[in-house]
Amino acid sequence: MKICKKKLKRRTYTEMIFSSILLFQARTNSLPLADEKKKHICEMCKNEVEDIKHFLFRCKITETVRKKFIKEVKKNEEETAIKYMLFNSDNTEKAKEYLKEIWKERRKNKIIIDKESARLKYDNTVKEVCEKRNPFQKRVVNC
């Protein structure tokens, strides 16, 4: 029984640290989003540049999580909403929970995208190797 409590406490503590780190990164605009990479477009929805505004308010993939925490934010109100969400001390715990859940959703979708992309690369590589090794196919092509 004590072991379970310790594991539960450790997990809760780890989640608290994780959400605090996410809040800090969001406040300092240092979340590792696509706007800092060569390809700036959001890897999940592929609609626009993935910056903090897109991550928090616009991405269609994380919309279900977003609706649980916040109401729709208009584009002209995004700056104010970011300041209120991230820097208002009354919202700290809610902001940390929102960031944690939306980050989990992003990671889940990124893993799916990475698996699909790896599968496509593998299929293309296998196809290329098979085409190169099949001497009959080369003869037909050269004729």
Image (spheres, helix red, strand yellow):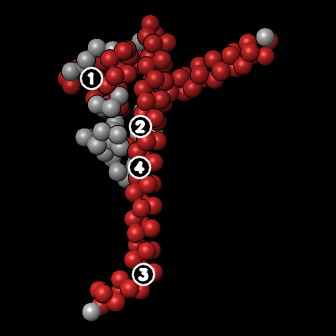
Residue 78, label in figure: 1
Q: Is residue 28 visible?
A: no
Relative to residue 60, is residue 90 drawn left or right?
Answer: right
Q: CA distance from mark 4 to mark 2?
A: 11 Å
Foreground label between 1 and 3: 3
Q: Mark 4 — residue?
A: 116
Amino acid marked by disc 4 = Glu
Q: Are marks 2 and 3 in contact (CB under 8 Å)?
A: no
Q: Position of residue 8 (x, y in %)?
A: 68, 16
Circle nearer the N terminus (4, 2): 2
Q: Could you classify mark 2 by the number of other residues whose Cα lies within 10 Å: few (under 14), some (14-19), or many (20 or more)?
A: some
Amino acid marked by disc 3 = Asn
Q: CA distance from mark 2 to mark 3?
A: 38 Å
Residue at 33% in and 32% down: 61
Q: CA distance from mark 4 to mark 3?
A: 27 Å
Residue at 42% in and 34% down: 106
Q: Could you classify mark 4 by the number of other residues whose Cα lies within 10 Å: few (under 14), some (14-19), or many (20 or more)?
A: few
Q: Could you classify mark 3 by the number of other residues whose Cα lies within 10 Å: few (under 14), some (14-19), or many (20 or more)?
A: few
Residue 134, label in figure: 3
Residue 6, quarter of picture: top right
Q: Is residue 42 visible?
A: yes
Residue 118, quarter of picture: bottom left
Q: Position of residue 57 (x, y in %)?
A: 30, 25
Which corner quadrant holds the C terminus? bottom left
